[in-house]
Image (cartoon, grey):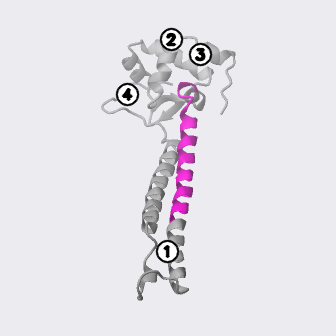
Amino acid sequence: MKVELDKQALFALASDSRIEILKALGPQRRTVTQLAESLGIDKAAVHRHLKKLEEGGFVVRDEDHGFVYYGLSWKARDIISPGENTKIVIVFASGWLMVAAAVIAVLAAISGMSARAGETMQGNETSGPGLDFLQPLPGSWEWGVLGLVLAAVAVGLIYLGYRRLRRPKQTGLAKGVRPVEVLD
């Protein structure tokens, strides 16, 4: 996504305190009291800064169970960590490349076993008589194991990319922190 900054957005970013508030909201949404305590700023000042950030489109206000929480908008997330989308694309691409490699490895294992069986059926067996045609070519089982390992890694990478993409909504409170005020 492309972030466009207008006059209000630039004004909202023109304060060190507002930048610190954005960084504090990065991991989770918070109340004015929580922000004031963690940053060591007066609650009234935090409230004024949050209003400017909200006008600039960087902060989203959310009322939940009688409390007012502030969290980052997509615009602020993209400014704070611009490489996040790139990381997700790389993880997904790596996962799908692993899937392709796993399919190739499994096909190599299957073709190795069928080639051996085909040689024996035509009477070209090199070892003694018996059921040797059921034995795979040397190394073909290793291709099968490699394919399974690559498939497992691919599933893990794709799951990791999905989790990054579908990041859970910011949770309300940090452990041990109780909000004590409600803003209108």
Dot 1, how many residues are within 10 Å of its Cα: few (below 14), some (14-19), or many (20+)?
Answer: many
Mark 1 lies on a secondary structure that is helix
Q: Which residue is mark 2?
A: 16
Sequence order check: which comes first, mark 4 or mark 1? 1
Q: Position of residue 53 (x, y in %)?
A: 57, 20
Residue stretch rendered in magenta on the structure: 79-106
Question: Which amino acid type is shown beneath numbered disc 3?
Answer: Ala
Question: Which amino acid type is shown beneath numbered disc 4?
Answer: Pro
- In whole angstroms, how far apart are the C-alphas of marks 3 and 1? 66 Å
Using the image, tell me which numbered label, if any, was put on residue 179: 4
Q: Is residue 42 magenta?
A: no
- In whole angstroms, how far apart are the C-alphas of marks 2 and 3? 10 Å
Question: Which amino acid type is shown beneath numbered disc 1?
Answer: Met
Mark 3 lies on a secondary structure that is helix
Q: Is residue 104 magenta?
A: yes
In-front residue for pair 158/179: 158
Sequence order check: which comes first, mark 3 or mark 1? 3
